[in-house]
Image: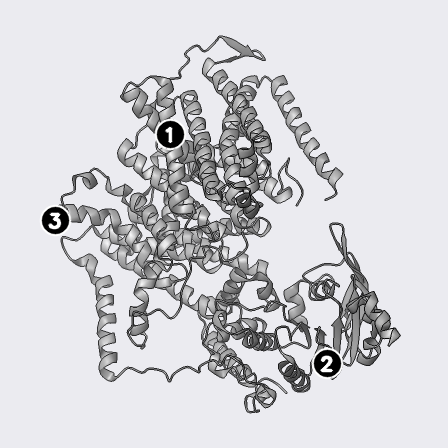
Amino acid sequence: MSVLEVRGCSIRFGGVQAARNVSLQAGEWEIVGVIGPNGAGKTTTFNIITGFYRPNEGSVWFKGREVTGLGVHERTALGMGRTFQNVGLVKSATVRENFLTAQHLEAGYSALAGMVGLPSTFVAERRLGERAEALAGILGLGDLLDSRVAGLPYGVLKRIELGAVLATDPDLLLLDEPTSGMGPEEAHALGATLLELRREFDLTVVMIEHHVPLVAQVCDYVYCLNFGELLAEGTPDQVRSNPEVIRAYLGQEAEEVLEAS
Amino acid sequence: MPRFLASRSALVGTAIVVVVAAVMVASGQRQALVIGVITGAGYGLVALGLVLIYKSSGVFNFAQGEFGTVAVYTLYGVHDLAGVPLLPAMLVGLAAAAAMALATERVIIRPLFSAPRVTLLVATAGVSLLAISLELWLGEARIRFIQPALGRLDRVSVFGVQVSDQRLLVLAALLMLAVLLGLFFSRTNLGLAILGVSQEPVATELMGISVRRLSSFTWALTGVLAGLAGMLTAPVVGSFAPGFLTTTSLIPAFTAAVLGGMTSLPGAFVGGVVVGVAQSLAVSAPIFYENIPGPGAVMVFVLLVVVLALRPQGLLGKSS
Amino acid sequence: MSLEESIDAPPVLEEHAVADPIAVQPAAPPFRPRPVGWMARGIVMAAVAALVLLLPTTKGAVDVHIYTQAVIFAIIGLSLNVLLGYTGQISLGHHAFVGIGAFTSAYMVTVHGQPFVAAVAMAMVVGGLQALLLGAVSLRITGLYFALVTLAYGTMAEESLFNIQKLTGGSAGQPAPKPTWFTTDLRYYYLCLAFLAAVIWVDWRLMKTKGGRALSAVRENPRVAATFGTDVKIYTLMAFVVAGVFAGLGGALLAHNDTFVVRDLFNFQLALVFVIMTVVGGLRNRTGVVIGSAFFGLIGYFFDKLFEHGLDLRVLKVLPKEYAPIVIGPMLLLFTLTRHPGGMGQQVRPLQRWLRGGRFSFKDTHEDEVRVSDVRA
């Protein structure tokens, strides 16, 4: 059964067709890669999947039901988690506060009850705090719980964002360029982390990536986009050796050079 | 929205205004229509200043009304109290308004230039409050009366409505100003530079124009516009009190600017007339004033919300 | 594996992690005061409580109802802080919320003969409803333009709503007698203090639970808030309702404090004073907002006292005390915005930290910037 299905989605902004008839699937516990040159429509597709954009045509299906009309927070409630290219966190808050905020749907009490200060809310808050600490522990962020997000180094921010997304208790993780700004060793380490997290949290992962070795290392299936359209799909090896894909990334001359050699 | 639809809405909007005007004339509301147009032109003048500041600094200038009120108080003090002849006194009034605008730019706008726009809005609101408080303190909390410069009330009639000389003067002055400003901003280098600096500050600097000087000039010009609006409309109203131009014209002027899409100078002026006519209609039509207290303010509020909700780019602005 | 089970599992990343090139220092062990330190803190807190509870009973002080006004201003400041500070929504029409609350309460008591409790409750409901309407508007119109709308709304209230003869008694005003057990000024002061305590409690719990966290996220980054599962629209509306309810409460208490409500009180200047006292107090800082608002509630009368004790500045004597807030206010506002964004709250922070059991130091651990709205615009 596929966890995520994008069926023929198209979207246009003004005169620009940002995505045309894009279809992709992610099966349970798969790690799916989405690659393509800059401006290929990868983040646009993510925005359609998560609900920031409503497609002009096509539909999005999550865990067997159509979610095309649902809002972002509703999809989070169903189990979609997503990271952003420029790190989606509440920067003026501490790490702990971010983890608590991300557990919004797990709180177990209504906002009104919280305001009034019913005793059950104190208990619930303590539980949320413990979960936040557990999460920080898993990601090696225990010492940083009470530090403000704003001052921290970029690599740490990525880890915190991952923690926050995990706090929403997702079934599907949509990662937008998780290794941007990382060197090859860090990227490799992230790959291993993803495999572990998939195992420990029963996750399906779809990730936008530029880092070819990482894609080869962890992805079960890869989609390549270009100019808003699906260019190729297949296993990492199939896609990597697809001449169309090579041309899209490197341009016409490179392909000719490769052919000649 | 596709381009042809956008211009169609503008046409529809204008058509509605023309129809409303015709209805008013036909139903005997000529007085209201004429007064509405003239008051509206006054709103348009204030709105011009608002749009100018917004285009050049991206700020909503809540102090605009007080630039004008300060001019009126200065005029009163210099002409009515100290006896200086009218024209020089008006120049002094304009100078006071320009000075206040320059001071605002130097002390408030520049230090906060990188702050969020809403912070600047609150800061200009603070400036207007400061001005009002000084007017209350130094000028006392009472109404003062100001005589129109031109006394005759019945020389001219437009559409069969008696229009006072003063009102005519105001209308003539406003129209002339509108034309002059239009020429200034489209033909002169300085005018084009002012409009261009918000889009391309670096390019403007490279052309040898100091962005700072331009900013100061723009604010001074806005002060002058507000000062003119105040000094021209106070005699028509017949009296003024602390906060005069702010309480009478600031919100209608902002509504006018919004109708012009916040970016169109002619749009702001036309918007002013629209607001003036709408308000006048609300105040003079029995179905309104018999059932709703303060119909003018209600009409302006409704107009503002409707335009912002349905067509945020205004009647004449471009679709974003 | 669930999150709870993973508490005992070894940290996943550490097995594969590569050291961050920039190491982050772990925090130093927490500071704990000695018993003497705790006693000192207790004494200070008791002194503050004594000041608040007993100051109005001393003779020769300002009239008690002025202290009550300061308390009510604190409630109003907190209500505006929910909108402006926590949610990042500008409201230049707060005088309308407060005024309508005041007239509603007076109307319920005088025209409908309802008891105080019912009247105040009605004022809170009406306050919440109008705020809800304005909140709905804010969903479609953002940032600067919404500020305009609130200003236009306030003007409309002034010229239209406050002129409804039956509701407001027109220019003559509407009487609003004090409630039965609390007919003296002093008793009414304690009643209002109790209301303030309730408002502070709700504000505190709000920010400590999911509602407040949602508001902070919505203020700073609505996309992230949505990704974290927050329904941005609902929580924005909730913020408006909470602010409106508190403002309505403040208005009702204000009406009965003066025992008479006149519409001239609720004007543009008052709206700005409300914004100023919240910003100068220190946005998002509960204590700061309370202090700032109380300051503005007391300020004119403060000057009166100074003059009586011999301060001889002829220039200042000309200024009627009602105008003091609007002269001082803008100057403090502009000073706060340009130089000292944390406001009064920032000054008090070292003391607050000390009282909570921390070390006393003048160094700030974070820099605040006045972001009247952190969002868009």
Identify the image quadrant of the C terminus of chain A. bottom right
Tell me the distance, in whole angstroms, between the alpha carbons under discs 2 and 1. 70 Å
Label 3 and label 1 in one chain:
no
Residue at 47% across, 58% down: C242
Q: Residue at x 48, y 9 (%)?
A: B154
Using the rendered image of the protein, determine whether residue C184 is visible from the camera's viewpoint: no
Q: Is residue B166 left or right of residue B306?
A: left
How far is disc 3 from disc 1 in space, using C-alphas? 42 Å
Residue A193, quarter of the rendered image: bottom right
Q: Which residue is mark 1?
A: B95
Return the residue at label 3.
C309
Name the residue tied to disc 2: A213
The amino acid sitting under disc 2 is Pro
Q: Nearer the viewer, mark 3 or mark 1?
A: 1
Mark 1 is on which residue type? Ala
- Residue B232, percent across and down? 44, 23
- Residue B295 left/right relative to C42: right
Other-residue count near label 1 (Cα within 10 Å), few / some / many at <14 / 14–19 / ≥20: some
- Farthest residue to the top: give it: B155
